[in-house]
Amino acid sequence: RIMRPDDANIAGNVHGGTILKMIEEAGAIISTRHCNSQAGEPCVAALARVERTDFLSPMCIGEVANVSAEITYTSRHSVEVQVNVMSENILTGAKKVTNKATLWYVPLSLKNVNKVLEVPPIQYARKEQEDEGKKRYEEQKLDRLETKQRNGDVILPIINPEPHTVGYSQSSLIHLVGPSDCTLLGFVHGGVTMKLMDEVAGIVAARHCKTNIVTASVDAINFHEKIKKGCVITVSGRMTFTSNKSMEIEVFVDADPFVDEPRERYRAVSAFFTYVSLSREGKPLPVPQLLTETEDEKRRFEEGKGRYLQTKAKRQAQMQQSAQ
Amino acid sequence: RIMRPDDANIAGNVHGGTILKMIEEAGAIISTRHCNSQAGEPCVAALARVERTDFLSPMCIGEVANVSAEITYTSRHSVEVQVNVMSENILTGAKKVTNKATLWYVPLSLKNVNKVLEVPPIQYARKEQEDEGKKRYEEQKLDRLETKQRNGDVILPIINPEPHTVGYSQSSLIHLVGPSDCTLLGFVHGGVTMKLMDEVAGIVAARHCKTNIVTASVDAINFHEKIKKGCVITVSGRMTFTSNKSMEIEVFVDADPFVDEPRERYRAVSAFFTYVSLSREGKPLPVPQLLTETEDEKRRFEEGKGRYLQTKAKRQAQMQQSAQ
Amino acid sequence: RIMRPDDANIAGNVHGGTILKMIEEAGAIISTRHCNSQAGEPCVAALARVERTDFLSPMCIGEVANVSAEITYTSRHSVEVQVNVMSENILTGAKKVTNKATLWYVPLSLKNVNKVLEVPPIQYARKEQEDEGKKRYEEQKLDRLETKQRNGDVILPIINPEPHTVGYSQSSLIHLVGPSDCTLLGFVHGGVTMKLMDEVAGIVAARHCKTNIVTASVDAINFHEKIKKGCVITVSGRMTFTSNKSMEIEVFVDADPFVDEPRERYRAVSAFFTYVSLSREGKPLPVPQLLTETEDEKRRFEEGKGRYLQTKAKRQAQMQQSAQ
């Protein structure tokens, strides 16, 4: 579809969150279609995880987003979908790959939302494809367990923070979940949640560096718990790490099922977003160093540095590989 | 994309206007892409006309709309696009054709919005395709001149109307044109206008028969004049004709360029929408007969009857043809 | 959240209605949460009244709106919420108070929408707080009764009106209530209604003075009757008074429950909005004097003048008090 002014920031760059939402909608369609392709209980595919994804080039207002999706692996209870996003300037005909994302879906029964159904297996062209898929499946399973640990954290407000401290830029927004945010099962689309997460992360980044910022990448996102229609969700973000030209922001999503439900507020999702600051000409700018004050902040900064160096090393390894 | 609650009426049927908007977006993308495919001044394709289109089967919340578009004819300054809409139930896999629409676009220069550019010619597989396209082109050109005539009409308010009279159900809405309603040129997308027209027509129909109603077909719509960002548009509808099971509603769009513009209010678009009333089981219901009071109302009723009988005859001819 | 192009007029000023909608959403969340904080029947807080509120400074596209809410008084069946809105320019760090609003909510049972539940009492830091709250409660109760009186009025259309008369600028819009407009109970959010009211009032003001206009203040708004999903609402506005630099517009909301409901059209809300006209530099401009023709128009003009002078006196008293 054509990108509109509301999809973009004031510099005309489409929000990463808008793109994540389109990716998730494509993934939900293809995996729901696949899981219902055999006779049996009807089901809706629910997003369980999005693998780390890079925003390779910015998309602008007036460009057309082409989203294509393909199922690349099925385990007994989950589907792996590969989604590619291309931006197309229909005036010049120029096309660019904007995103490649990998998503994991789980089929939930339409009749009993807590029942996970079985996934019809796909055919692989070559045996290696199946093996590689299985390896990815095992890896993401491990990683999901790990992130469940770090989920107890809470963002407390800070009074009169100094510029460039963590407390200075931290932000949160609340959103009342409406009908159009939800699937047929009455639970929030993963894409809606990701769009809100990107919005908060973007505010944190802009508060920190006071310039035009864009999403550079999103860490793997795990959807631990479903969020029901009528909930209030609180999306909070705080900066965890800065390199010379990038900022890492941790985002939490908490759901408050305050009507009709005896349940306490719970942590539904958490993830790391990386942002860069761009000049008017679209060149990356240096970002102010994050000032850490508490022991926790220093620890998180070091952890962020670890992730940053790991990603950098991985990218260099890939470049060497493709150069060979 | 997946149909959401906001796209549909309370019975779960997707509004005809939502479908018209998707059709127009697809048409605008393919024709803008085509008109920029040769070196030259960059341009944006503006909707000039939509041919009569039937809504063959209703689409429901949760279904996926598949929209495909193809260029079928080019004249020197216009492009004919054929758009097909299929609804797909991704739970059952069932697919149905929802709509087939033909749209005409005109390329306007990005630098000078009043300059119509030339269209790169397409290649035809067979000579007959070109001839048939040319015939359609000539026909629509004639028809556009005709509808310009009837455009002077104004809908006057009626005080304390009786049920089932024209005045009882006539309705109008105003809308302030925002940035997301507009193309790169700063003019309202044809699809946005059609969605508002369908909204008003639907309210007229529901006021008349007080039941659940759906769009059955839309007469050819001509876009005589562009509407600029910041305008207020008034969309008015009145019932012109009822058969046993259908209602015809005439809709006018007037634009009011009231900020910073010396121009008077002008008529931008007009069209006829046909609605049917559906029972809870989706069966067509009889509709109350329209009570005409003035001479003009009686004349419009007869004209509507003419269009109704003509369409009916055409449809029967097609059925006989396809039965042969 | 970040203000987007669609939230604002063509001069980039965020619509008062967008701000009112955010205020109401925050109020609805905090009061629903409070009313469900004790074991008992689940409920949803419905907006009963918004006290008069001033728009202290305009908000612009790209700024972040910070909305905070606090419960300040509880009677047996109602909750008073104080909401503050700050605009923050995240590039410069500049913050401004945009709005302070007081809202009254009533808890309605989720099982039986006509049953008003009891509100858990809040603890007051000092006895005076409770007494002042009680005084505000009694005052608004009186005022609500009064406004119920003036509610019978209807806006009749005028044919070929002269510029600057009441008939020239009066406007109305219709809106079909969709799922996203509604609470869990299936009734329109107060904030959605206020946004539409501001939209109509803004069109009336712009039609009158043909310049860029912004909401300056909103009179107390009482929500007499709920509006159900599937209704068509008609929002009508007419100018009642002009001072040198401000315009007062009276807005009515009528609901038409026309599908499957035997009920007649009824008046749901009414209120006065005050607008000012701004130059390109954001300075207030003089507005054309309203031409009153009928006796009713002259009477309403005098009443508006009364409200204007009263507000002016109150503001001067406050300024003297705070200067002491």
Image (tube, coloured by chain):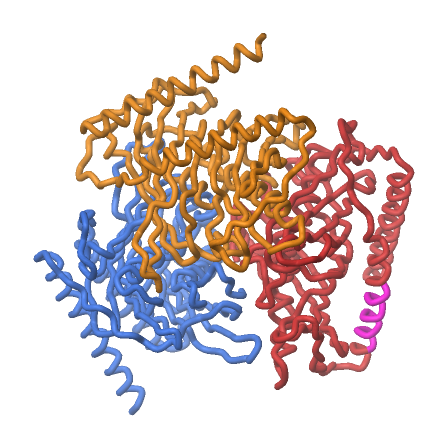
Chain colours: A red, B blue, C orange
The answer to which of B117 and C208 lies nearer the viewer is: C208
Percent x, y of residue A91? 50, 52
Left or right of C284 on screen, residue C44? right
| Residue B49 in view | no
Q: Is residue C47 above or below residue C131?
A: below
Q: Residue furthest left?
A: B295
Q: Let me know if residue A139 is in the magenta part.
A: yes
Give the residues drawn in magenta, as a range. Answer: A131-142
Task: From the viewer's side, name the closer residue of A153 and B275.
Answer: A153
Residue A94 percent location from the top left of the image = 58, 55
Mark count:
0
Residue C88 lies left or right of residue B79; in this view the side is right
Residue placed furthest toward the bottom: B324
Q: Does the magenta-highlighted stretch encompass residue B238?
A: no
**Residue for point 40% across, 58% down:** C230
- What's the residue at 60%, 55% (across, down)? C42
Choose between C84 and B248: the one closer to the eye.
C84
- In the image, taking residue C321 as reference, residue A272 lies left or right, namely right
Which percent across, then down, holds residue C211? 37, 28
Image coordinates of residue B304 in percent, x first then y, are 18, 66
Position of residue A110 relative to residue C242, above or below, is: below
Q: Residue at x 86, y 56 (%)?
A: A149
Q: Name the quadrant of the C terminus of chain B.
A: bottom left
- Compared to A110, does B147 lie above or below? above
Q: Is residue C61 rendered to the left or right of residue B322?
A: right
Per the picture, the main secondary structure of the magenta-coloured stretch is helix
> Would residue B140 be visible to someone looking at this image?
yes
